[in-house]
């Protein structure tokens, strides 16, 4: 009996799947030859743990609950068996339907997932389409009218198509909910439940999340039937190859310290994280003024701006990409040498996602976090969740940084206004970028009228900048968000 069959036999008997019996070759998985050819062409060598454990039960048609962090190869863990099963089914999708539906929290992740499906299914005749905001509806309507085999979508724009009658979900054979914890952080729980109600009762459901708090577990329980549970790493642990460091610094001197850090020639490609869109723009401008090529990516950017910034970053035309947590989900760029947390996240699990953007494809990485006095509570939460004490240095009172800060233009020489925060703050606080989700360009953050929850029409939250459109206007084009050797 092959290792693959042993694994499937163990699952049928509900026996634990031993790590000692992990598959060591894609040839052991029983995938069709066309998929194996694509895997070989991509120079992938062996399955990652999530792939080795998830692919056999998915091939068998089982529901699956996968707990895996970013960078573990989970996209291939569901894409490969889905493509195998669709090809074996050998039928065409009906107009305005899809056979496999993959739900993603952001545009960038949706595009990335679709690219993987197209790459793996290159030699098949299966069609792949994406549905997300920030782009026009008409091309999506035309693609859906013909019917598609694989549809990758963000929840907001997907519901737009459902409501307009350009898509129905009654023919879905397999549905995937990817990055479920991020879905809930973005406020998609009600949309997911409505989408789930439109799906056939008889279907295969796959559910992936980096963490499994109680609310995620409850959502999974209503989404899955008798699932196989696969957990390849303890929740919220950080990659061992990442060298982590915290620098204590005054908030108003962070910009000067960031420029000093970027003077290090070892930093070849860096991701810098902020908590807000406005903060990302300010940091990118400051880096540019300091002769460090940089661009910002967040929900207020148009889809073309986001794609251009990401393409420039991948091609090395800019050295630094400044991002918010929402926009960064789905950024899969090899060769990121450093991650800098210009501001610590107020959701500790986000720290794990952030620093996981480096040390990919078997390489080492460095994560540097700048911590002001009012962020100490966030640091304590991060260390508690990741079960570690992060090495730290203290640059407070540094005269060199003080002089550099004093030389900044007066408009820049001010710390960004922060809301009062601490342990009592809502854990969904990263919605300071976007409460509705989908990285929707800042138009409809919470309700359909474009106002944040609790805000009055015309109210200016935050830095005095209007949030979205006046009530009643529905911007159509900006609804949704936005390793060699192993497959991602």
Image: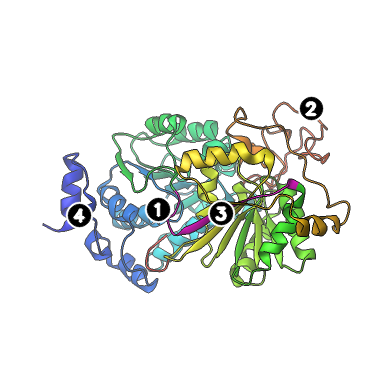
Indicate which disc, 3 or 4, sits on the residue closer to the N terminus: 4
- Residue 469 higher or lower than 77, as above or below: above
Q: Secondary structure at mark 1?
A: helix
Precedes in sequence: disc 2 or disc 3 = 3
**Closer to the camera in the image, 85 or 391:** 391
| Dot 4: element | helix
Q: Position of residue 316 (x, y in %)?
A: 62, 72
- Most foreground residue, 339 or 455: 339
Q: Give the residue displayed 83% in from the left and 39% down from the top.
A: 464
Task: Based on the picture, tell me whether residue 244 belongs to the magenta stretch.
Answer: yes
The mark lying in front, picked from 2 and 3, is 3
| Spatial separation of the CA atoms under disc 2 and disc 3 | 42 Å
Q: Label 2 belongs to which residue?
A: 456
Q: Which residue is mark 4?
A: 21
Report if residue 164 is visible in the image.
no
| Local SS, label 3 | strand
Pointer 1: what residue? 74
In magenta, the rendered stretch is 238-251
Q: Quadrant of the N terminus?
A: bottom left
| Residue 245 image label | 3
Q: Is residue 338 above or below residue 413?
A: below
């Amino acid at each position: 009996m092959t290792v693959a069959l042993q694994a499937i036999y163990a699952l049928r008997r509900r026996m634990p799947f031993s790590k000692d019996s992990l598959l060591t070759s894609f040839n052991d998985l029983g995938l069709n030859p066309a998929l194996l050819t694509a895997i070989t062409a991509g120079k992938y060598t062996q399955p990652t743990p999530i792939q080795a454990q998830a692919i056999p039960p998915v091939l068998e048609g089982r529901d699956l609950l996968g707990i895996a962090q970013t960078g573990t190869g989970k996209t291939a863990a569901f894409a490969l068996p889905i493509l195998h099963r669709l090809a074996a089914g050998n039928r065409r999708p009906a107009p305005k339907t899809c056979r496999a539906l993959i739900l993603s929290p952001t545009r960038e992740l949706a595009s990335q997932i679709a690219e993987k499906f197209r790459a793996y299914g290159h030699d098949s005749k299966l069609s792949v389409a994406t549905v997300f905001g920030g782009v026009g509806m008409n091309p999506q309507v035309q693609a859906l009218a013909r019917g598609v085999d694989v549809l990758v979508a963000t929840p907001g724009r997907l519901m737009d198509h459902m409501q307009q009658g350009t898509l129905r979900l009654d023919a879905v054979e397999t549905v995937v909910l990817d990055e479920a914890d991020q879905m809930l952080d973005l406020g998609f729980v009600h949309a997911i439940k409505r989408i789930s109600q439109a799906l056939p009762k008889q279907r295969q459901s796959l559910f992936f999340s980096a963490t499994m708090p109680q609310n995620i577990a409850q959502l999974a329980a209503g989404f899955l039937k008798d699932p196989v549970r696969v957990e390849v790493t303890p929740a919220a642990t950080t990659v061992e190859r990442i060298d982590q460091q915290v620098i204590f610094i005054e908030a108003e001197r962070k910009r000067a310290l960031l420029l000093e850090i970027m003077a290090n020639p070892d930093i070849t490609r860096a991701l810098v994280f902020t908590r807000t869109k406005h903060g990302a723009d300010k940091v990118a401008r400051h880096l540019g003024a300091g002769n460090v090529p940089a661009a910002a990516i967040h929900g207020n950017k148009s889809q073309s701006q986001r794609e251009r910034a990401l393409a420039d970053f991948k091609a090395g035309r800019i050295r630094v990409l400044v991002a918010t947590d929402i926009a960064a989900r789905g950024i899969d760029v090899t060769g990121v040498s450093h991650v800098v947390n210009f501001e610590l996240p107020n959701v500790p699990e986000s720290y794990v996602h952030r620093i996981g953007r480096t040390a990919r494809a078997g390489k080492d990485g460095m994560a540097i976090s700048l911590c002001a006095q009012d962020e100490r509570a966030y640091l304590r939460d991060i260390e508690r969740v990741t079960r570690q004490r992060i090495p730290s240095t203290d640059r407070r009172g540094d005269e060199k940084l003080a002089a550099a800060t004093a030389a900044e233009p007066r408009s820049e020489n001010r710390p960004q206004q922060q809301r009062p925060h601490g342990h009592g703050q809502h854990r969904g606080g990263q919605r300071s970028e976007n409460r509705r989700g989908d990285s929707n360009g800042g138009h409809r953050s919470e309700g359909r009228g474009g106002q944040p929850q609790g805000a009055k029409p015309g109210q200016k939250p935050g830095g005095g900048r209007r949030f979205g459109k006046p009530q009643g206007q529905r911007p159509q084009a900006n609804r949704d968000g936005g390793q060699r050797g192993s497959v991602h």
